[in-house]
């Protein structure tokens, strides 16, 4: 049977790279995103307008995946956001960062778990951040929320050791994106991580071949 992979944040740069990698492996793919009406390849289930900060919306999305494909084998929690902000900013973004980066992963995971447990090789792959290992000025809200993703990954991996489901996270440094090039014009993007390279690491962790790995926080930092 063909495995089914769900990608949250599937319309973002990393999400699209993961979609391309999954299609190359002939997987069934569903993309979930807050954005609506995006074009996806034939055969891909596109679930737009989904607010994953709402547990009920996450449940409905996973139910739609099961209705379409009949199974769910792997979940890539890519949905999230970033803000650079000093702690003294008058409009703190801490709640927003936790909602976008941690709550979305938690809700998608909880909604997917009953289906993943029925898979012979269930997989959850989260996106943490290398910057959350030791924060820097202006990174407090983002790093704290991603540190929460790290702890979620570790705790859930322990909770699921008696099942087929493994839980791991990738910790990228800086992705080579158009926006990052604009924001850091003096940096050398050749040292950064290509979204396609990060996607391939995530696809390996989502595969049956990664069954011996769980609870890992895997740096994917390029040459940064």
Image (spheres, helix red, strand yellow):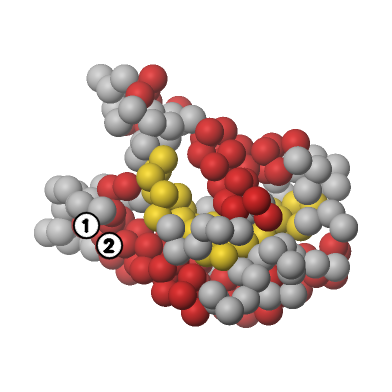
Question: Is residue 212 left or right of 130 when viewed as pictured?
Answer: right
The residue sitting at 27% across, 62% down in the picture is: 144
Q: Position of residue 99 (x, y in %)?
A: 42, 67
Viewed as shown, does residue 15 lie left or right of 38?
Answer: left
Question: Which residue corresponds to the image point at 54% horizontal and 75% vertical from the top-left?
Answer: 161
Residue at the image point whose x is 85% and y is 62% from the top: 69
Residue at the spot 41% in from the left edge and 68% down from the top edge: 154
Q: Which residue is mark 2?
A: 144
Q: Which residue is mark 1?
A: 140
Q: In this orientation, which residue lies closer to the viewer: 85 or 169?
A: 169
Front residue (pair 67, 147): 147
- Estimate the spatial distance between the alpha carbons at disc 1 and disc 2, rounded to whole Å: 6 Å
- Quadrant where the C terminus sits is top left
Graded by Cα atoms within 10 Å as few (under 14), some (14 to 19) or many (20 or more), the crowding at tag 1 reads many
Q: Is residue 119 above or below residue 34?
A: below
In the rendering, at what x and y percent does residue 101 appear?
42, 61
């Amino acid at each position: 049977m063909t495995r089914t992979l769900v990608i949250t944040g599937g319309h973002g740069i990393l999400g699209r790279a993961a979609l391309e990698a999954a299609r190359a492996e002939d997987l069934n793919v569903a993309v979930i995103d807050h954005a609506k009406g995006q074009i996806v390849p034939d055969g891909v289930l596109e679930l737009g307008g989904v607010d994953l900060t709402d547990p009920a919306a996450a449940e409905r999305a996973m139910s739609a995946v099961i209705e379409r494909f009949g199974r769910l084998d792997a979940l890539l929690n890519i949905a999230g956001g970033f803000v650079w902000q000093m702690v003294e900013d008058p409009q703190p973004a801490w709640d927003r960062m936790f909602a976008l980066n941690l709550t979305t992963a938690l809700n998608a995971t909880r909604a997917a778990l009953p289906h993943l447990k029925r898979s012979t090789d269930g997989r959850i792959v989260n996106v943490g951040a290398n910057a959350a290992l030791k924060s820097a000025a202006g990174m407090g809200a983002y790093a704290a929320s991603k540190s929460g993703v790290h702890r979620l990954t570790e705790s859930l991996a322990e909770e699921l050791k008696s099942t087929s489901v493994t839980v791991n996270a990738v910790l990228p440094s800086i992705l080579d994106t158009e926006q990052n090039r604009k924001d850091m014009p003096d940096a050398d993007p050749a040292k950064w991580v290509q979204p396609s390279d990060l996607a391939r690491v995530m696809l390996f962790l989502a595969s049956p071949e990664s069954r011996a790995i769980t609870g890992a926080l895997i740096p994917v930092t390029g040459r940064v």
